[in-house]
Image (spheres, rainbow, N blue to C red):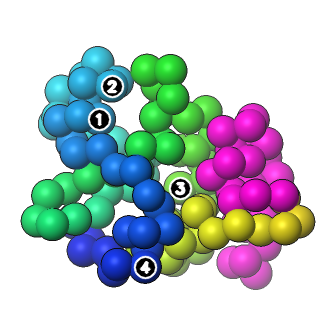
Amino acid sequence: MTQIDRDTDALVGDWLTIREAARALGVSPNRIKQLIRDHKLLGATRSGELSIPAAFISGGDVVKGLPGTLTVLADCGFSTDEALRWLFTADDTLPGAPIEAITANRGTEVRRRAQAMAL
């Protein structure tokens, strides 16, 4: 897994360990690792421990629209660190950060923007 830099760590804010994420989703830690491999979640190493952003889980499930967005970003060649920065950096035209738009059920627009970056 990817070790992220301090700026990205601070930008993301709240993180969950793999065990905490597994508990929040009601699955095993191995399932969380599989979701990361399948680009349904992003995981990064923080202080030697694999973690995911807390904003990726809401109401006991992965935020609707996030997996599709992560797949688009991976297809565009974004590293984990780049994808996290993009998802958590405010964009005045959305408004807010892309993760906020996805959480507010505006994932289609976020994916459209991600796809446009690949062109």
Residue 78 falls inside the magenta stretch: no
Q: Is residue 6 above or below residue 50?
A: below
In the rendered structure, the answer to whether residue 58 lies left or right of residue 86 reads left
Viewer-nearest of discs 2 and 4: 4
Image coordinates for residue 92, horizontal then vertical, percent? 84, 68
Residue carrying label 4: 7
Mark 2 vs mark 3, CA separation in Å = 20 Å
Residues tagged 4 and 3 counted as in contact (Cβ below 8 A): no
The label on residue 24 is 2
First to last magenta residue range: 95-119
The label on residue 70 is 3
Mark 3 crowd level (few <14, some 14–19, many ≥20, 10 Å Cα):
many
Residue carrying label 1: 21
Mark 4 vs mark 3, CA separation in Å = 20 Å
The amino acid marked with disc number 2 is Ala
How many labels sit on residues?
4
Viewer-nearest of discs 1 and 4: 4
The amino acid marked with disc number 1 is Ala
The amino acid marked with disc number 3 is Leu
Q: Is residue 58 above or below residue 9?
A: above
